[in-house]
Image: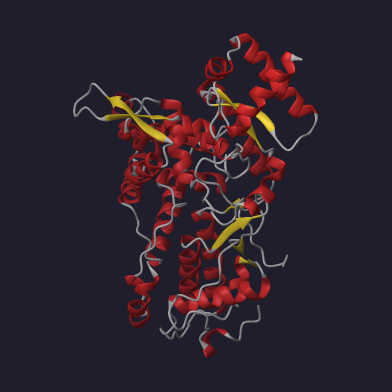
Amino acid sequence: MTPGENNSLEEAGQLDLYRIELESFQGPLDLLLHLIKKNELDIYDIPIAEISKQYLSYLEVMRELNLDVASEFLVMASTLIHMKSRMLLPSDEEEEEEEEGEDPREELIRRLLEYQKYKTAAEELGSRPALGRDVFARPEDEVTSPGEDTYIEATMFQLMDALQRVIDEADKRKPHEVTRETYTIDEGIGHIESLIAEKGSIRFGDLFSGQESRRQIVTIFLGVLELIKKGRISAVQEEQCAPLRIIPVPGTEPVSDTGAGGGQVSGEETTDDGG
Amino acid sequence: MMEDRNKALIEAMLFASSSPLGIDTIHQIAGLDKERVREILNILAREYESQERGMVLKEVAAGFQLRTPPEFSAQIGKMHQARPRRRLSRSALETLAIIAYRQPVTRTEIEQIRGVDSGAVMKTLMSQNMVRILGRKEAPGRPMLYGTTRVFLEYFELRDLESLPTLEEITDLGEELDEGIWGAGEGETDISEEDV
């Protein structure tokens, strides 16, 4: 997604041409762990039906965002569905169960625990003082900027949770919305950047005035992803459980390379923002 | 008197070196016994520590290096801001963790644990010299075996791989973390509308 591609974007003005992949976007195991933690479930006794439902609704949101849903996510979806059906089998098939000898969830639990171990190890590594960021030595070739060390970077899943909440709110307010499909991602980006320019940093929820259509919300969200990907903003938390905030990345200029319309916000659609 | 000059010499070498200095190297260049070198390094490390200087002497990647203390990261970072380096991504950290603990390890083994394709992130880590090829596995297809590098140890201020916490310790740590998060309240991304 180089700035040069924006023209075609603007004229297309539709989301399905726009695919975004985020680094922070981990795999299906990460998503499952997220759901387990979020619902405070026991990893050794996962309610497969409930987890499958939530897992699939996540894939739905990803699809709605036109995120590249990697095939691994789909494989996991079918594994979950298969597991669910096996667990629904009537218990008079005991014989067979004894033969197979184990809970259909066992393999998944083993994988989740294994993955979680390395995920924690990765967090532990990430918390060590990093050369060129936290500590410095006589430089060989490169040195770095400090980054936002006091913040916790939000995960893709947390962003999607936040998005879902905004969408749910919007759905509650306007069950029958009439949409105008004229809102482009560039406009979304302009909207975000003008808010950040004005306020310094902003809560994720405040990116939306509450008046947007579902389509506009998604477009603004795609703008957030795009700006994160370009390294201009970060989605962070001040601590665990704190609301998501959007902060500018120090040392980057607000966008003016998104084509002529970069900084401008489409008049009738968004300027009525209360904030 | 002579001892002071030896200490000054080793300090000078540490100051002028852009990579951690091994005891062997100092021994060869300074012409001092290895035991003596280690003693002096220990004295220097204690001095930097106790005098709260702008540098600390750290043992990293089987050598010794003068580094700034973490408390000045913001200011030193600002000084270097013209050439920012991005922090490691989650996927890079995850892949590195698996390689660090499982090496020598194949890409397939890494991907089995992570549950996602890891080709791109491996390539990045290779280009950053965090990861290297150790050889090939005696198995069908003779897949490459990967391991971490000296750059990896330097980056994370590790003396050697043994100074990483064990996976058992990691698991306990993970449980503590989880309890902490779970205990703190419902939902980890609570963005309620009230507290603007």
Picture coordinates of residue A31, whole percent (x, y): 46, 48
- The residue at the far left in this view is B141
The percent coordinates of residue A209 (x first, y second) are 60, 78
* Residue B179 seen in the current view: yes
In the rendered view, tell whether residue B39 sits above or below residue B90.
above
The foreground one among A94 and B58 is: B58
Where residue A133 sits in the image (x, y, percent)? 59, 45
Q: Examine the rendering and report whether any part of residue B187 can be seen.
A: no
Q: On screen, B12 above or below B86?
A: above
The answer to whether A25 is drawn above or below residue A94 in the figure is: below
Q: Nearer the viewer, residue B76 or B70?
A: B76
- The residue positioned 36% from the left and 34% from the top of the image is B110
In the rendered image, the quadrant that contains the C terminus of chain A is bottom right
Residue closer to the observer: B64 or A112: B64
Q: How is the image coloured?
A: secondary structure
Picture quadrant where residue A1 is located: bottom left
Residue at position x 69%, y 50% in the image: B75
Q: Nearer the viewer, residue B51 or A114?
A: B51
Number of dots carrying numbers: 0
| Residue lying at 61% horizontally and 38% vertically, measured from the top left | A129
